[in-house]
Image (tube, rainbow, N blue to C red):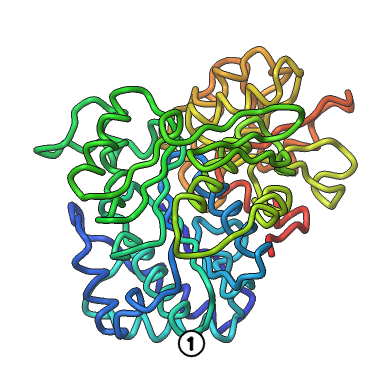
């Protein structure tokens, strides 16, 4: 799967072409390569501002967005690295609140790629090394770091002592990597997922989690015990729920009455609550309740139940965009749209579950149009049953829909979502 992106800046594109040539040796696991690469760069990961490290199957990106918004509402300068990018590679490296500029990005990638040329690093290892090198160079008050895949062997897991670690919602995804047989690991799928995500736990560091089914909770608790992490689990150590059109959060110290997120979707209060809990269970970075409240409202996270603005692709129609592609995402979308009839435009990469979205949304669907995912191998319309029809691209799919006033949902892939944002002129900033 390729995820290297393109750039209008020739200097950046030259480095992205070098990234595209990288490959990961089959079967390689572990953190040796990223550690060797970082060592050649002066071990920048050891000189970062306080780090908030977030893993999870669904919601980790949104949790990072809430964390950043809350910290910035406190007046702090915040670095952030998240993935994947939607339109531009620059989105992966946010330096003191701003996306990294092209000129600096080109020079940074060149330095990292040159330093690791004989190490055969992966795309993600180079990206994380570049992000950490820049974060160590530019002064800031905090870092928000999203795990790329899993946790235990993720390149971000070189951070020895974060301010806090968090684990968002768990579900089955990336089975090829996270459920590969390995001696000494759980055999039950959700327990194995929890085992991998909880691999970010660190000695003496808060590990703040959502509530999970028992088999997953047990794995998280065991990871905390093995490492000496300070476990704070929802339902046991902190609580959150909706009350009087707001978010009610409570822990052993106090109860906070917070506003609801501006981000749409019934799942976003859950992600906001995890961000609140992470901030309140650490004592490295000071943050006030009023900053937490402002951050809950200010957080923005594109392509997650995002309603598109009127534009060259969406026109004046009600069009929603979501990059979700697994069963957990399908459940969230079904909750959001309830019994609302809608048109679904779906693009899904091979290897995912074709029924992940269509099954939960089955009662909503007035039509189902399947489109390619640019630059990736994707499922054809036949994979989604007799009701599905094919279109050459999103623009053609939208153009073929009747003018019946029903909303349109475009979903199935963050890569497709990035193309939609580009075509509608809504580039993430």
Q: Residue at x 57, y 55 (%)?
A: 67
Residue at the left extreme, as displayed = 183
* 308 over 388 or under it: above or below: below
> Tag 1's secondary structure?
helix
State the residue at coordinates (62%, 22%): 388
Q: Quadrant location of residue 258?
A: top right
Residue drawn at point x = 70 percent, y = 33 percent: 409
- Position of 41 with respect to 107 (left or right) is left
Q: Residues within 10 Å of mark 1 (few under 14, many from 20)?
A: few
Residue 74 percent location from the top left of the image: 65, 64
Find disc 1 in the rendering and name its residue: 107
At which x and y percent is residue 132?
A: 41, 74
Residue 356 locus on image (x, y percent): 50, 26
Q: How many marks?
A: 1
Would you say residue 177 is visible in this rendering? no
Query: Left or right: 82 with respect to 307?
Result: left
Specify whether 123 is left or right of 374: left
Q: Is residue 377 above or below residue 192?
A: below
Q: Residue furthest front?
A: 253
195 above or below 312? above
| In the foreground, 429 or 107 | 429
Q: Residue 211, located in which quarter of the rendered image?
A: top left
Residue 293 percent across, percent down from the top left = 69, 49
Name the residue: 76% across, 18% down: 341
Q: Is residue 303 above or below residue 320?
A: below
């Amino acid at each position: 799967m390729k995820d290297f992106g393109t750039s209008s800046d020739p200097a950046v594109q030259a480095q992205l072409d070098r990234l595209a040539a990288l490959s990961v040796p089959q079967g390689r696991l572990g953190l040796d390569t990223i550690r060797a690469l970082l060592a050649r760069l002066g071990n920048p990961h050891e000189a970062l501002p306080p780090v908030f490290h977030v893993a999870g199957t669904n919601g980790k990106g949104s949790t990072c967005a809430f964390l950043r918004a809350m910290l910035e509402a406190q007046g702090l300068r915040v670095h952030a690295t998240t993935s994947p990018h939607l339109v531009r590679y620059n989105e992966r490296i946010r330096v003191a609140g701003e996306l990294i500029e092209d000129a600096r990005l080109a020079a940074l990638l060149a330095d990292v790629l040159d330093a690791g040329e004989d190490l055969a690093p992966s795309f993600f290892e180079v990206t994380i090394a570049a992000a950490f090198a820049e974060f160590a160079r530019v002064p800031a008050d905090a870092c928000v770091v999203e795990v790329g895949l899993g946790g235990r062997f993720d390149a971000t897991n070189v951070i020895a002592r974060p301010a806090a670690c968090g684990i968002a919602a768990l579900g089955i995804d990336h089975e090829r990597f996270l459920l590969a047989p390995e001696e000494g690991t759980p055999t039950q799928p959700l327990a194995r997922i929890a085992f991998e995500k909880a691999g970010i736990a660190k000695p003496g560091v808060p590990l703040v989690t959502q509530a999970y089914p028992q088999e997953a909770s047990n794995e998280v608790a065991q990871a905390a015990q093995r490492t000496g992490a300070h476990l704070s689990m929802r339902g046991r150590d902190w609580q959150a729920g909706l009350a009087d059109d707001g978010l009610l959060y409570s822990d052993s110290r106090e109860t906070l009455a917070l506003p609801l997120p501006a981000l749409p979707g019934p799942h976003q209060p859950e992600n906001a609550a995890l961000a609140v809990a992470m901030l309140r269970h650490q004592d490295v970075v000071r943050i006030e309740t009023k900053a937490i409240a402002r951050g809950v409202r200010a957080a923005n996270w594109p392509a997650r139940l995002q309603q598109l603005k009127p534009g060259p692709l969406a026109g004046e129609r009600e069009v929603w965009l979501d990059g979700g592609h697994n069963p957990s995402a399908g459940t969230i979308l079904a909750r959001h749209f309830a019994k609302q009839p809608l048109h679904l435009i779906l693009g899904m990469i091979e290897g995912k579950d074709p029924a992940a979205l269509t099954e939960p949304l089955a009662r909503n669907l007035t039509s189902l149009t399947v489109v390619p995912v640019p630059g990736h191998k994707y499922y054809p319309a036949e994979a989604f049953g007799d009701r599905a029809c094919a279109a050459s691209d999103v623009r053609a799919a939208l153009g073929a829909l009747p003018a019946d006033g029903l909303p349109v949902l475009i979903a199935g892939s963050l890569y497709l979502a990035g193309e939609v944002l580009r075509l509608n002129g809504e580039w993430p900033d």
